[in-house]
Amino acid sequence: MCGGAYSHQGKCPAMGKQCTNCQRLNHFAKVCRSAGKPKSGERKVIHAAQTIQQQNEVLDMDDDDQPEGTVYVIHTTQPGNGRGKRIPRCTVKIDGHQVPALIDTGASINIHAQSVFRQLPTRPQLRPTTVQVYAFGSATPIPLAGVFTT
């Protein structure tokens, strides 16, 4: 994740690069989500760690005027109770129908699950897409079912 325009013509410039903030691969320090380096002489104390796993199912994308970058339709599951973590949610309208959505201000696209798409009373026609979508830090693209315009 380089922080540039989402849909790169080729490989993302950050792929294979090491972050100077957290030393992890595939993103630059300017978009790093880690807490940052401790200041000199300062020790960082971690009281507890929690692993949150996400499983994503992708469905469709939107808008021909944009370079196929706005994606609508991901199913996210969070194993465990997620104590202390509130997941920000909202409701969006797709073709006049209200659909629950997960808010991710760090994401350049939004997607929903096929199950959400199937629940729409009027289903827009899906078209093939060449856009490749990657989960944060992943080198493997998430499979997309297609794109639609409402």
Image (spheres, rainbow, N blue to C red):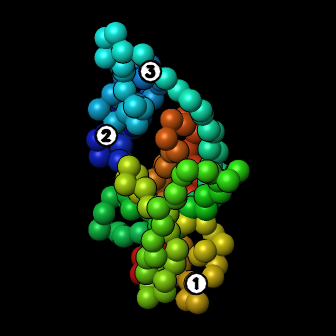
Quarter occupied by the C terminus: bottom left
Q: Earlier in the sequence, mark 1 or mark 2?
A: 2
Instruction: Judge depth for marks 1 and 3 and give the one in front.
Output: 3
Instruction: Judge depth for marks 3 and 2 and give the one in front.
Output: 3
Say if residue 78 shows up in the picture: yes
- Report the front residue among 72 and 132: 72
How many other residues sit within 10 Å of disc 1, few (<14), some (14-19) or many (≥20)? some
Circle 2 sits on which residue? 3
- The count of marks equals 3
Residue at (55% x, 89% y) in the render: 122
- The picture quadrant where one finds residue 39 is top left
Residue at (58% x, 39% y) in the render: 140
Q: Residue furthest right?
A: 80
For residue 58, side relative to residue 6 (left or right): right
For residue 121, side relative to residue 11 (left or right): right
Q: How far across and down, in percent of the image, does residue 17 sit? A: 41, 22
How many other residues sit within 10 Å of disc 3, few (<14), some (14-19) or many (≥20)? few
Gap in angstroms between the C-alphas marked 1 and 3? 48 Å
Circle 1 sits on which residue? 120
Q: How far across and down, in percent of the image, does residue 13 sit? A: 36, 30
Q: Amino acid at mark 3?
A: Lys
Residue at (63% x, 39% y) in the render: 51
Q: Earlier in the sequence, mark 1 or mark 3?
A: 3
Say if residue 146 shows up in the picture: no
- Report the front residue among 146 and 59: 59
Q: Amino acid at mark 2?
A: Gly
Q: Amino acid at mark 1?
A: Leu
Circle 3 sits on which residue? 44
Label 1 secondary element:
loop
For residue 75, side relative to residue 23 (left or right): right
